[in-house]
Image (spheres, rainbow, N blue to C red):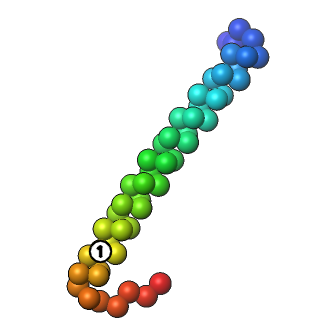
Amino acid sequence: MFENMMDMVGKLQEIKDFWIVTLNKNIKSATDKNEATLAEVAKQELPFNF
């Protein structure tokens, strides 16, 4: 499957990089939605309790 250990290490690094990029995109998307919700609440001048 892998020619040697270096190939395996390289593939694992690619997988790790993929997951970091994927998680960062999802975190940004969730943050954007949260900020939009907070902005909408602020426009309505409703109390917002955490």
**Residue farthest to the left, as pictured:** 44
Question: What kind of element bears circle 1?
Answer: helix
Residue 31 placement (x, y as % from top left): 41, 61
30 versus 34 height, above or below: above
Count of residue discs:
1
Q: Residue 6, located in which quarter of the rendered image? A: top right
38 versus 13 height, above or below: below
Q: Residue 42, located in which quarter of the rendered image? A: bottom left
25 versus 44 height, above or below: above
> Which amino acid type is shown beneath numbered disc 1?
Ala
The residue depicted at 64 percent of the width and 29 percent of the height is 13
Residue 24 placement (x, y as % from top left): 49, 48
Residue 30 placement (x, y as % from top left): 41, 59
Q: Is residue 45 left or right of residue 2?
A: left
**Residue farthest to the top, as pictured:** 3
Q: Residue 28, located in which quarter of the rendered image? A: bottom left
Residue indicated by mark 1? 39
Q: Nearer the viewer, residue 36 or 8?
A: 36
Residue 40 placement (x, y as % from top left): 26, 76
The residue depicted at 44 percent of the width and 51 percent of the height is 26
**Residue farthest to the bottom, as pictured:** 47
**Residue farthest to the right, as pictured:** 5
The residue depicted at 48 percent of the width and 42 percent of the height is 22
33 versus 27 height, above or below: below
* Mark 1 surroundings: few (<14), some (14-19) or many (≥20) residues within 10 A: few
Quadrant of the image containing the N terminus: top right
The residue depicted at 55 percent of the width and 40 percent of the height is 19
Q: Is residue 41 left or right of residue 1?
A: left
